[in-house]
Image: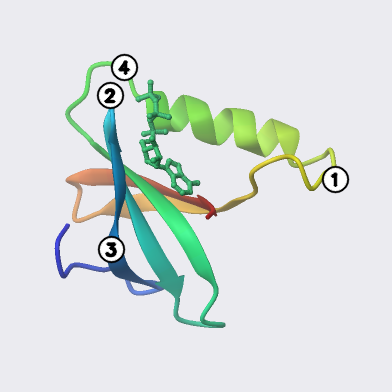
Amino acid sequence: MRKRHTKRFQITGELGQGSFGAVYAVTRRSDKQHLAMKVESVNVKKSMLAHEAEVLLSLSVVKSAHFVILYDKGSVENRFLFLVQTL
Ligand SMILES: Nc1ncnc2c1ncn2[C@@H]1O[C@H](COP(=O)(O)OP(=O)(O)OP(=O)(O)O)[C@@H](O)[C@H]1O
């Protein structure tokens, strides 16, 4: 993912590595907001990222400053799944 970006986000750095993928600092091009992008290979047997996206989507009905917000999700070149959330 180094130097790569989706159309909507510019990757600016790496925040960490988890057990199922990497997390990058990104800037949303539309409004320059700084966010976190979690990335997972499409080849994993059981997608933890898809599960995390479902959980964040469910939580989004509860308007609370304590919950991470899911801003976007998608895939890159059919190689990675990504979700974008609060930094
Ligand atoms: N929203 C975020 N904002 C900033 N940094 C984050 C964010 N999410 C994750 N990170 C960083 O990326 C690292 C990896 O996160 P990730 O959620 O992939 O795994 P984890 O929380 O360490 O645990 P596990 O791999 O067991 O799920 C974290 O330890 C943290 O340093």
Of labels 3 and 4, earlier in sequence is 3
Which residue is denoted by mark 2 in the rendering?
19
Of labels 1 and 4, earlier in sequence is 4
Of labels 1 and 3, earlier in sequence is 3
Q: Which marked residue is nearer to the observer: mark 2 or mark 1?
A: 2
What amino acid type should be assigned to the residue bearing mark 3? Gly
Q: Position of residue 21 (x, y in %)?
A: 26, 35
Which residue is denoted by mark 3 in the rendering?
13
Please tell me how crowded label 2 is: few (under 14), some (14-19), or many (20+) other residues with Cα within 10 Å.
few
Q: CA distance from mark 1 to mark 3?
A: 29 Å
Query: Which residue sits at x=19%, y=56%?
Result: 77
Of labels 3 and 2, earlier in sequence is 3
In the picture provided, is 43 more to the left or to the right than 14? left
In the picture provided, is 36 more to the left or to the right than 66? left
Q: Quadrant of ligand 1?
A: top left
Query: Which residue sits at x=30%, y=70%?
Result: 12
Q: Which marked residue is nearer to the observer: mark 1 or mark 3?
A: 3
Q: CA distance from mark 3 to mark 4?
A: 26 Å
What amino acid type should be assigned to the residue bearing mark 1? Lys
What amino acid type should be assigned to the residue bearing mark 4? Lys
Which residue is denoted by mark 1 in the rendering?
63
Residue 19 figure quarter:
top left
Q: Front-most of 54 and 37?
A: 37
Query: Which residue sits at x=49%, y=25%?
Result: 51
Mark 4 in CB contact with mark 2 (< 8 angstroms): no
Q: Which marked residue is nearer to the observer: mark 4 or mark 2?
A: 2
Q: Which mark is residue 46?
A: 4
